Image: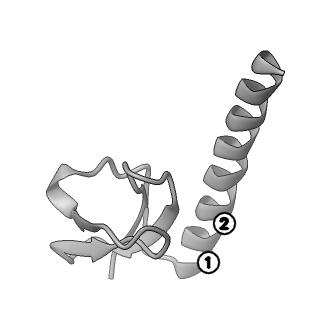
Amino acid sequence: MRFGVIVCPQCKQVKGIELSSQTTKCIRCGKTLQMKKLKIFYETDSQEKLRQSIGLLNAELDKNSTADKKIFI
């Protein structure tokens, strides 16, 4: 089974998904996402590597949003 990491285009929630799915629902905003329209940031066969990559992407997005906030403060 192949897994991937996506980011909801509406609310920016990072999520792990099964790549065989055609749709998935964002756990934060509830938007139904079409897999063919999403950017896959990372692919793996390992659930452990999937969890790690979700954490790394969350950290990267958080770092970028913190930097943006500092500019406007």
Residue shown at the point (64%, 43%) measured from the top left: 61
Residue shown at the point (43%, 49%) measured from the top left: 41
The furthest residue to the front: 73
Q: Secondary structure at mark 1?
A: helix
- Where is the C terminus found, in terms of image quarters? top right
Q: Quickly name the residue at label 2.
A: 52
Residue shown at the point (65%, 54%) measured from the top left: 58
* Residue 51 percent across, percent down from the top left: 61, 72
* Residue 30 percent across, percent down from the top left: 37, 73
Please state which of residues 27 and 54 is positioned toward the viewer in this rendering: 27
Please state which of residues 26 and 73 is positioned toward the viewer in this rendering: 73
- To which quarter of the image does residue 20 belong? bottom left
- Where is the N terminus found, in terms of image quarters? bottom left
Disc 1 marks which amino acid? Glu
Q: Mark 1 touching mark 2, by CB under 8 A?
A: yes
User: Which numbered disc covers residue 48?
Assistant: 1
Is residue 25 rendered to the left or right of residue 58? Answer: left
Q: Is residue 56 above or below residue 50?
A: above
Category of crowding for the residue at label 1, using alpha-carbon neighbours closer than 10 angstroms: few (below 14), some (14–19), many (at least 20): few
Please state which of residues 24 and 11 is positioned toward the viewer in this rendering: 11
